[in-house]
Image (spheres, helix red, strand yellow):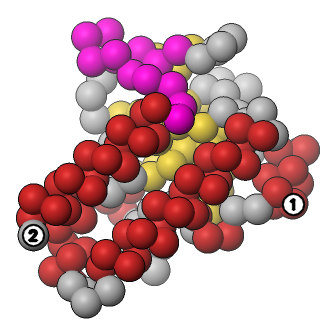
Amino acid sequence: MKTNILLLFLLTSIFFGACSNSQSKSTNTSETDSAKIEQKDTSTFYIDQPCLVFIIPDSTELWQMKQDDSTSFYAAMDDYSFYLSQAEVLSDSLNIKSFPTSKKLLDFKTIKNEHLIVNLLNLKAEDPAWGIYLFNGIDSPELKSSIDIDRKLLENYFKK
């Protein structure tokens, strides 16, 4: 069972890595068409441009989720994977960059050079484990459930 959870996590990571940008482990830098997100350390994910940030639970969190609710765990994993992939396709269609991460610290840098730090270890129990942060580069990032992401929401948020 633990192998299945790990395999599912790895497949999800590979899927999102293939759909979006790739991070080099040697330089910790992610490159996109015209922008670069530099990863200065291994525990923090740095964001300095408008984008979606997909929060992916790590293997420990996945194991805990399975322990908490083993009867619906695989159905929930399947649902979340579906909604995350739909959000990825939608963001691509709207030319909004997206980045997956399982890092626990997010450093959002606004156009005013302000750093907005999000510590995912401090999330409330009701916050989505597979959430998506919307960041327009100006305002504080907003955490949304992957189920709530739709065209209207993204168009309105990134129009600000």
Q: Is residue 29 toward the left or the right of residue 108 in the image?
A: left
The mark that comes first in sequence, 1 or 2, is: 2
Name which residue lies at 32% across and 86% down.
72
| Number of residues whose C-alpha sits closer than 10 Å to that of mark 2, classed few (under 14), some (14–19) or many (20 or more) | few
Name which residue lies at 57% across and 63% down.
83
The disc at residue 152 is 1
Residue 23, magenta (yes or no): yes
Residue holding disc 2: 1
Label 1 residue SS: helix
Kindly check if marks 1 and 2 are in contact, taking CB atoms under 8 A apart as contact. Answer: no
- Mark yes or no: residue 156 visible: yes
Amino acid at dot 2: Met
Name which residue lies at 46% across and 41% down.
16
Depth order, front residue of 54/104: 54
Residue span colored magenta: 19-31
Query: Relative to 114, is 28 above or below?
Result: above
Q: Quadrant of the N terminus?
A: bottom left
Q: Quadrant of the C terminus?
A: top right
Residue 74, magenta (yes or no): no
